[in-house]
Amino acid sequence: MSQRIDCDIIQDLLPLYVEHLASEASCRMIEEHLESCGDCRITLEEMKAPVREETEEEKQEIDFLKKIRKRHKRLITAVTAVSLLMAAVVFGIAVKLFVIGSPVDPNSLSYECSYNEETKELTIHGTIGYRMTEYSGLKVKKSRIYGNTLDVSVLGADRLSYDKNYETNFTETITIPGDGNDWRVDFVGPGYTRRNIWSEFRFEDMTPEEMEEFLYPETHVTSEQVKLITSDMTSADIQELLGTTAGTHQDGSLEYTLTYIVDEDYLIELIFNTSKPDLPCGKTGDEILAGKRKKETMKYRIEGDTLITFPKD
């Protein structure tokens, strides 16, 4: 056996030798080897040397490093959590813009409708008039403003290239509730925009009260309700106070108008901006009432399927 191998064996046995756990035969072999091997004697002396205790300064330094390491781990965890949250938000926005899409302006749509009397199904063939928007779906729900009305939102997803031809055509079939009579279907979009595309009710079947409601679908309020409006109230605050009005329109800008009938004889119009929903109206109820106008009393006549209205003399 070579000297190196002897040393390896002896150094493996030295811990047992130091602790007095080696057998007598092993002890004799170790002692005989130590007489001729300086390296193993040095190793033995190092094992027998007392372990030096850490100084207070060293302990404080170790504690400080442990605290730094712990804070570093917390910082990494916090940064990772914030990064994941931001990634989730960005992903959600991207999905909303480029996958789900948002309602397009009804005035940008061209369409044709066909109605099946037997199945009560209305088929809509339409086209979105935006070059960088691709059709992504249709959302249908009963109107919260008009009775017997289905609100149809055409969803368009944003696209990035002006040169590509995206799919802007769509064909969708919706079922008209009940027997289909006295129902209408409207395209609805941002800023309370609304466009009637189909109706099955007949004007000649309306009572005078129903015709009045049709001609003036706006929400009826009292002047005392309007006086409760303060200048710092937003459009949402006013609608919560007065109710949601059907008398809205949009002229192609970001502004939209809420129209109310006050005390049955007057009209007020409140103008808001869709891009600034939290912007205060800036007027008190008294100031709004100062701009009210007399509601015209309308006459009407029916020619075929067309309703013709004109003010009474």
Image: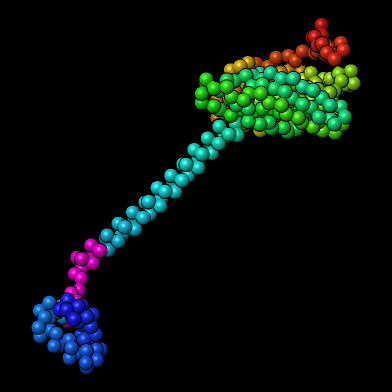
Q: Identify the image quadrant of residue 257.
A: top right
Majority SS type along the magenta span: helix
Image quadrant in which you'd find residue 120: top right
Residue placed most toward the observer, 58 or 38: 38
* Residue at the spot 37% in from the left edge and 51% down from the top edge: 76
Q: Which quadrant, please, contains the C terminus?
A: top right
Q: Position of residue 123 (x, y in %)?
A: 77, 26
Query: Left or right: where does residue 27 sit relative to residue 231?
Result: left
Residue located farthest toward the front when viewing the structure as drawn: 1
Q: Is residue 251 visible?
A: yes
- In the displayed image of the protein, which residue is found farthest to the bottom? 24
Above or below, 6 against 303 in this view is: below
Residue found 68% across the figure and 31% down from its top: 138
**Residue 108: x percent and y percent?**
64, 19
Residue 288 visible, this orientation:
no
Note whether 309 is above or below 134 in the view shown. above
In this rendered view, identify the residue nearer to me: 289 or 57: 57
Which stretch did the figure color magenta? 45-62
Q: Is residue 239 left or right of residue 41?
A: right
Judge whether residue 53 is colored magenta: yes
Q: Which residue does the image show at 52% across and 20% down from the upper left?
A: 163
Queried whether the magenta region covers residue 61, the answer comes back as: yes
Q: Residue furthest top?
A: 313
Residue drawn 69% across and 32% down? 139
